[in-house]
């Protein structure tokens, strides 16, 4: 293959490159036992640098000695952080107390029944949740209006080495390798690229994608030259998922690097953003994790463009509020952040939760827990919202979002087990509660609606008992204060919508943002459109998340499926199957409401309309045509969409250039038919035995049996299942057996054809 011409690789430990095999290897692959000696060679480049292990001991959640286990004195948040906390939590408490009082007055016109007390309780929980979000947004709005965060200055030099790591799992290779090449080019343009090494950390299980990743790595190495410090490691067993992937890197290579910047498979960051993060970390020896605010980019479907617009206009207000009150007790979102490597290794080895999944086993939402544990050790965790140039993508459809939310829901519910951990800072517990409530809020909202419907049904159809058996001077009338109820509803809606209007005001005042969104009029129309669409989508998401919570409470594990990142539409049949229960729930609620009271239907109209139209909403918002049509007329525009950052443009170009070289129809056929690539592939397998002698898995035994039984390579490949294909690719012994098989004998030509060719 042209992409491999002149490229030679060795495995990550300096060994012979054959793993547990005696299979033939290309003579161009060096054989040496000393890693440093190999690194001095100039005719080839290692697939991974020399290992520099860091101990990463498993931490205990429930045993913590503050004197022995803490790495340093705890960080102290400043005056403004404490003032912000007082405003956020004090204001939220005052709002919640007022809302609870008003709700009690709504139901206490007559005797308060058990159902009415339940309604007050559910309202209190939900109202307190949105009150904290509101007061936090108020702080963020004031901060951005008066001062605004500032980005750290770009330094003249970087003193310590930093690893840029991108964990990947069954992703489109052209996209992720093109993205990292774009980030690499941006960092090199700063003149400080010598301080960074670049790593693809693959947990891929799809055999064709695995081979395509190796082709992409070879093509990228050929483009950038052997001097480029870009590396690739594939993990044969993806234990503990993403957290295990990062942990494997830190425990084997982390000693080489003072810091690491963790990216996601859809991450993009400018060179200034990465260098700014590194400078901030070097300037603050007490920092453990510094997080950026990623903005959503490259989205085209209507659903994704709504998310993209909301993140761009409202996200800065929310992020500024969080940064203000969190201070040095912040949170970590798993990517687009820089981490102090030794502190992470010493204090962030995640334990397994006792019991079986979904609430036991590996900690899925590891980022929140890692932030809490490194903060527990005395290192600060904070966000720098002033750093621009941090980007990510979002799911293209509501169904894709639901699939991602399913994983996040399970991980966040596991935080219930982490919440009582010893030694955590109060702010860290608040972050865990935030993650938990992000999903429990949906079933609580549903319960509040259900109790409200039952109360209206009771008032309309059940004959009230005006005089109970207890002695009273006055009858018990089951009534509500309608006027106070309407005022409380208006207050609730105001609190929900206020952060959106804060973002709109700031965008209108900021000329580059206003112009980048198409001007003040189009920006305002886009905000109204986003509010309407979000209101219609919200009840659908409520039922989806309620289903997820119920699913996990009954003990079902979510698994680990790759996220779909392209803009392709989902079939209409799949949309109908996914949302038919939501539509049924909407019609059932509509009919029940009409039978009970027309005013109930009016009160619940946004919820009912969203559910009744769930199939149409999911289909329409997932269509490219609607999203692109709105972009053409200037709606839901963002500044980064109108004037794309250079890193985004580079990533698109590089991904297109890589699409052809990495196209792999059949991974085993590529290994069989391309000797040069086979040499590269075998050399990149982990050194040492892939399995202990006599430890034969069913997949290995079946793969070997099929290879021995087959008469041709095509026959063998046709028999193999995906897991058996992957087993062969990861074992040099089986690869040697594969290449011993002959090609199919071409069918004999008819006599007439032979005579024609001879003549």
Image (tube, rainbow, N blue to C red):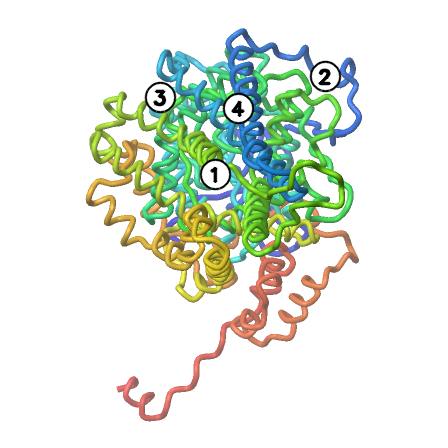
Question: Mark 2 or mark 3: which comes first in sequence?
Answer: 2
Taking 508 as reference, is 162 left or right?
right
- The secondary structure type at the circle numbered 2 is loop
Disc 4 crowd rating (10 Å Cα; few below 14, some 14-19, many 20+) is: many
Question: Mark 2 or mark 1: which comes first in sequence?
Answer: 2
Question: Mark 4 or mark 1: which comes first in sequence?
Answer: 4
Q: Nearer the viewer, residue 489 or 183?
A: 489
Disc 3 crowd rating (10 Å Cα; few below 14, some 14-19, many 20+) is: some
Q: Are marks 4 and 3 in contact (CB under 8 Å)?
A: no
Q: Nearer the viewer, mark 2 or mark 1?
A: 1
Q: Which residue is mark 4?
A: 95
Q: Which residue is mark 3?
A: 190
- The secondary structure type at the circle numbered 1 is helix
Q: Residue 628: x and y, percent? A: 26, 48
For the point 70% across and 65% down, which residue is it? 701
Disc 1 crowd rating (10 Å Cα; few below 14, some 14-19, many 20+) is: few
Work out which residue is located at the far top of the displayed protein and give it.
Answer: 79
- The secondary structure type at the circle numbered 4 is helix
When the figure is inspected, residue 648 is found, relative to residue 731, above or below; the finding is above
Question: Mark 4 or mark 2: which comes first in sequence?
Answer: 2
Question: Mark 3 or mark 1: which comes first in sequence?
Answer: 3
Q: Residue 376: x and y, percent? A: 68, 20
When the figure is inspected, residue 527 is found, relative to residue 689, above or below; the finding is above
Can residue 387 be seen?
Answer: yes
Work out which residue is located at the far bottom of the displayed protein and give it.
Answer: 751
Q: Which quadrant of the rendered structure holds the C terminus?
A: bottom left
Question: Mark 4 or mark 3: which comes first in sequence?
Answer: 4
Spatial separation of the CA atoms under disc 3 and disc 1? 63 Å
């Amino acid at each position: 293959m042209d992409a491999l011409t002149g490229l030679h690789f060795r495995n990550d430990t300096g060994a012979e490159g054959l793993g547990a095999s005696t299979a033939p290897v290309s003579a161009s692959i060096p054989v040496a036992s000393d890693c440093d000696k190999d690194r001095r060679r100039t005719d080839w480049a290692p697939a991974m640098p020399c290992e520099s292990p860091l101990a990463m001991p498993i931490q205990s959640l429930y045993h913590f000695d503050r004197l022995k286990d803490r790495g340093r004195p705890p960080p102290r948040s400043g005056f403004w952080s404490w003032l912000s906390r007082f405003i956020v939590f004090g204001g939220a408490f005052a709002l919640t107390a007022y809302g609870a009082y008003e709700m009690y007055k709504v139901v206490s016109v007559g005797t308060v029944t058990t159902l009415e007390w339940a309604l007050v309780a559910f309202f209190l929980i939900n109202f307190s949740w949105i009150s904290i979000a509101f007061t936090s947004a108020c702080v963020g709005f004031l901060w951005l209006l008066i001062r605004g965060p500032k980005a750290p200055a770009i330094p003249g030099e970087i003193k310590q080495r930093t690893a840029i790591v991108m964990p990947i799992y069954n992703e489109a290779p052209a996209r992720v390798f093109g993205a990292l090449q774009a980030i690499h080019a941006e960092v090199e343009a700063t003149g400080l690229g010598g301080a960074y090494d670049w790593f693809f950390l693959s947990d891929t299980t799809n055999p064709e994608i695995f081979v395509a990743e190796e082709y992409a790595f070879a093509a990228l190495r050929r483009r950038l030259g052997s001097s480029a410090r870009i590396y690739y490691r594939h993990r044969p067993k993806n234990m503990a998922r993403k957290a295990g992937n990062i942990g494997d890197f830190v425990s084997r290579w982390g000693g080489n690097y003072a810091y690491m910047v963790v990216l996601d498979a859809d991450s993009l960051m400018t060179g200034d953003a990465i260098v700014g993060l590194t400078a901030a970390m070097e300037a603050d020896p007490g920092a453990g994790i510094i997080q950026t605010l990623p903005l959503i980019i490259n989205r085209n479907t209507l659903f994704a463009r709504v998310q993209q617009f909301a993140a761009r206009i409202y996200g800065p207000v929310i992020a500024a509020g969080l940064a203000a009150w969190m201070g040095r007790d912040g949170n970590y979102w798993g990517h687009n952040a820089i981490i102090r490597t030794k502190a992470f290794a010493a204090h962030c080895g995640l334990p397994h939760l006792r019991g079986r999944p979904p609430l036991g086993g590996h900690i899925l939402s590891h980022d929140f827990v890692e932030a809490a544990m490194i903060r527990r050790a005395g290192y600060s965790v904070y966000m720098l919202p002033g750093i621009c140039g941090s980007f990510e993508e979002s799911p293209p459809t509501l169904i894709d979002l639901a699939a991602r939310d399913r994983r996040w829901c399970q991980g966040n519910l596991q935080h219930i087990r982490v919440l009582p951990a010893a030694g955590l800072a109060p702010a860290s517990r608040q972050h865990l509660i935030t993650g938990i409530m992000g999903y429990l809020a949906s079933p609580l909202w549903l319960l509040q609606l259900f109790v409200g419907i039952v109360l209206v049904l009771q008032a309309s159809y059940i004959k009230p008992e005006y005089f109970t058996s207890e002695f009273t001077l006055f009858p018990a009338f089951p009534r509500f204060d309608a006027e106070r109820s309407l005022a409380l509803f208006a207050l609730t809606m105001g609190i929900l919508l206020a952060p959106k209007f804060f973002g709109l005001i700031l965008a209108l005042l900021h000329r580059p943002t206003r112009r980048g969104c198409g001007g003040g009029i189009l920006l305002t129309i886009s905000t109204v459109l986003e509010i309407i669409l979000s209101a219609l989508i919200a009840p659908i998401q409520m039922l989806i998340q309620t289903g997820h919570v119920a699913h996990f409470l009954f003990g079902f594990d979510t698994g680990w499926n790759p996220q779909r990142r392209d803009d392709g539409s989902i079939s209409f049949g799949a949309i109908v199957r996914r949302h038919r229960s939501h539509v049924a729930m909407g019609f059932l609620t509509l009919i029940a409401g009409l039978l009970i009271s027309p005013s109930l239907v009016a009160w619940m109209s946004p919820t009912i309309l969203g559910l009744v139209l769930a199939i149409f909403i999911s289909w329409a918002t997932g269509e490219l045509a609607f999203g692109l049509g709105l972009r053409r007329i200037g709606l839901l525009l963002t500044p980064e969409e109108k004037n794309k950052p250079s890193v985004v443009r580079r990533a698109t170009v590089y991904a297109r250039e890589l699409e052809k070289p990495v196209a792999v129809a059949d991974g085993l056929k590529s290994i069989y038919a391309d000797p040069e690539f086979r040499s590269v592939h075998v050399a990149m397998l982990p050194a040492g035995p892939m399995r202990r002698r006599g430890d034969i898995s069913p997949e290995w035994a079946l793969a070997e049996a099929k290879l021995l039984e087959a008469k041709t390579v095509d026959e063998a490949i046709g028999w193999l299942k995906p897991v058996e294909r992957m087993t062969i690719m990861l074992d040099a012994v089986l690869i040697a057996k594969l290449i011993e098989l002959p090609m199919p004998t071409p069918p004999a030509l008819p006599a007439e054809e032979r005579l024609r060719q001879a003549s």
